[in-house]
Amino acid sequence: MNATVLEVRDLRTHFGQAKAVDGVSFSVARGEVLGLVGESGSGKSVTGFSIIGLVDPPGTIVGGQIVFDGRDITRSSREEMRALRGRRMAMIFQDPMMTLNPVLRIDTQMIEAVQAHENVSRTDARARARDALGMVGIPSPDERLQAYPHQFSGGMRQRVVIAIALLHQPDFIIADEPTTALDVTIQAQILAEMQKLVAQNNTSLIWITHDLAVVSRLADRIAVMYAGRIVESGPVSDVLARPLHPYTAGLIDSVPSRNQRGERLRQIPGMAPSVARLPTGCAFAPRCPRADAVCAQAVPLFAAGPREHRCVHPLPELRV
Amino acid sequence: MTAAVVRRLLQAVMVMLAMTVIVFIAINVIGDPVDILISPDADQIERARVVQALGLDLPLWQQYLRFLWAALHGDLGESYVYNEPAIRVILERLPATLELAVAAILIAIVVGVPLGLYAGLRPDGILTRVIMTVSILGFSLPTFWVGLVLIMFFGVQLGWLPSGGRGQTAELFGVQWAFLTKDGLAHLILPAVNLALFDACLILRLTRAGVAEVLPLDFVKFARAKGLKETRVIGVHVSKNIMIPVVTIIGLEFGSIVAFSVVTESVFSWPGMGKLIIDSINVLDRPIITAYLMATVAFFVIINLVVDLTYTALDPRVRLQGEGP
Ligand SMILES: Nc1ncnc2c1ncn2[C@@H]1O[C@H](COP(=O)(O)OP(=O)(O)OP(=O)(O)O)[C@@H](O)[C@H]1O
Ligand SMILES: [Mg+2]
């Protein structure tokens, strides 16, 4: 774990008035797994799409830098970005039922992915596709190449998608809740598989999820997003054991397994704010038990060693 | 697959049979051809002779059975006007209508699909707004009126294109075709454009709607995430998904075009089936009308079958009914 593969600096991606991502900074080292967590609508997916240059209109990156391979790719041309996507960076989506084109065979969809970046024959591309399918644990890959997506189960489809993401051994993969749509056993298998594969290739992984349990198993570091910003980040075990930001603490407390049997599930009171009307200060303040007048002012980034947070009243280091 | 096709064919036969009943009864309701065929000053004996010769004195059900029996042998009666087998008269006119319809569909596709793609990809463009406005006009203007305007403008005012008839023809597979000669082709343009207008607009709007629907889907985004070129994303991933409704419409509209060619053929004096049927209705030439209707039904049935088969080729998720799980 050493060289930085990707560095995002003060990224701002807005959809008109809606500041979906508003000042996100983080970096990922080679081979590192970063868990990006946060409530629905906090801007996790938009962050991912910003990095690979596929933000849906009317969204645009209005500020910040995404430094990859020594250059700011927010300034790259469309063609430069296309040449990076799929080859040096890959993205996996949430719903494997929707990710593959229903009317094209698996081989078509894999061969085109190989040939998009390398001048190889169909036969060679096909062989690469077959090997990739074998690698992600799909039985009789030669036959399965001929099949259409609907002939696969959800879990198998997500494996195909992962195989496609791995075709060019990218520097990093952004996985946007890739197991949320799958049932628990399949989820566990895919997690284990994914962990093994990125470790083998020393690929960095940005794993977007709601699920703190997944993050604790999989990630090296965690970044917690709230209303378009990262409010806390650090090594995953530290952050989960001793959260500094009250929002992180709230997230941890609302994980079902941490609650006592028979007790009501604890929830963070209130609702996530609309990203169209964010306060100048801490966006979490209205829901925060520790908030006071100071929180209405802009919050700087506090950093101590590997841990960073944006809270003027962080929780005491030791929590039981 | 084979079982499914056989089933479809059986269904088709049933449809055809039902149609014979409807056509036969309808034809008997619309008037007595004897009045038209015989000069008003013919006497009773002459009249009775004609009625008997045509078999019009028999009870209706007997007439129907005779008709059905003959139809099964490919005999739909002899035209009162041409004194030739009706089926032959129809088939002689079929190539003219067919080439007009095919030309119209081709024009509709070549114009409609690219413009629809453009409009779908640039929903806010100025050109898109122009295209969509024009397409509404194309929908709502009556075919015969557009035909007359085309004739007046390109035929009469500018004198660029002939405005009536089929021009020279040349033979291919023992059939005369206009599109094989330069003169015939020039004659084909205006009626084909006229006939294509409605369907070009329909295909355009359908393509645009399809693009708007498919573009935000995850698999399009994933195709881009793989680093595919935009031409491939649109040309393969998007197009293949929107082709399904477009092919259906093209298939169904091909039938309508044959039906609508009645108007266009009359406006442009195009000697096809459409013009023939109008002339035949005017003189109540029953066998021709019957043969025309039967031929049209057969045509629709065949097209539906072809569309169904194309479906399975385009969409792997669709399996023909009766094929099993
Ligand atoms: N296509 C879009 N048009 C307008 N606004 C959008 C669009 N996509 C995202 N947004 C805005 O960005 C915000 C963040 O969306 P994003 O999809 O990144 O959330 P998320 O953290 O991934 O949530 P989830 O966990 O539900 O996937 C949304 O609340 C929405 O306001
Ligand atoms: Mg998301």
Image (cartoon, rainbow, N blue to C red):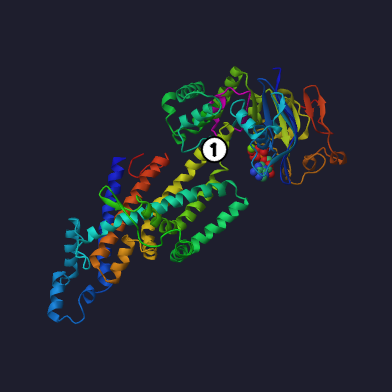
Q: In this view, does A224 lie above or below B127?
A: above
What quarter of the picture does the N terminus of chain B occupy? Answer: top left
Looking at the picture, tell me which residue is in the foreground, A90 or B30. B30
Q: Position of residue B87 (x, y in %)?
A: 23, 59
Q: In this view, does B11 lie above or below B284?
A: above
**Dot 1 surroundings within 10 Å: few (below 14), some, or many (20 or more)?**
few
Q: Is residue B277 left or right of residue A185?
A: left
Q: Position of residue B275 (x, y in %)?
A: 33, 64
Ligand 1 contact, mark 1 (Cβ < 8 Å): no
Q: Where is residue A139 in the image (x, y as percent from the top left)?
A: 45, 23
Q: Quadrant of ligand 1?
A: top right
Q: Is residue A187 above or below residue B211?
A: above
Residue B29 at least partly seen? yes
Q: In this view, does B224 lie above or below B283?
A: above
Residue A178 at least partly seen? no
What quarter of the picture does the C terminus of chain B occupy? Answer: top left
In the image, residue A181 lies in the stretch drawn in magenta = yes
Mark 1: secondary structure: helix
Question: Could you tell me which chain the residue with mark 1 belongs to?
Answer: B
The residue wearing badge 1 is B231
Residue depicted at 60% across the width and 47% down the height: B122
Q: What residue type is labelled 1?
A: Thr
Q: In which quarter of the image is residue A297?
A: top right
Q: In this view, does B241 lie to the left or right of A218?
A: left
Q: In this view, does B239 lie to the left or right of A231?
A: left
Q: In which quarter of the image is residue A240?
A: top right
Q: Position of residue B173 (x, y in %)?
A: 27, 47
Q: In this view, does B207 lie to the left or right of B259?
A: right
Please state the extent of the stretch shown in magenta in the rendering.
Answer: A163-185
In the image, residue B322 lies in the stretch drawn in magenta = no
- Return the residue found at the far front: B159
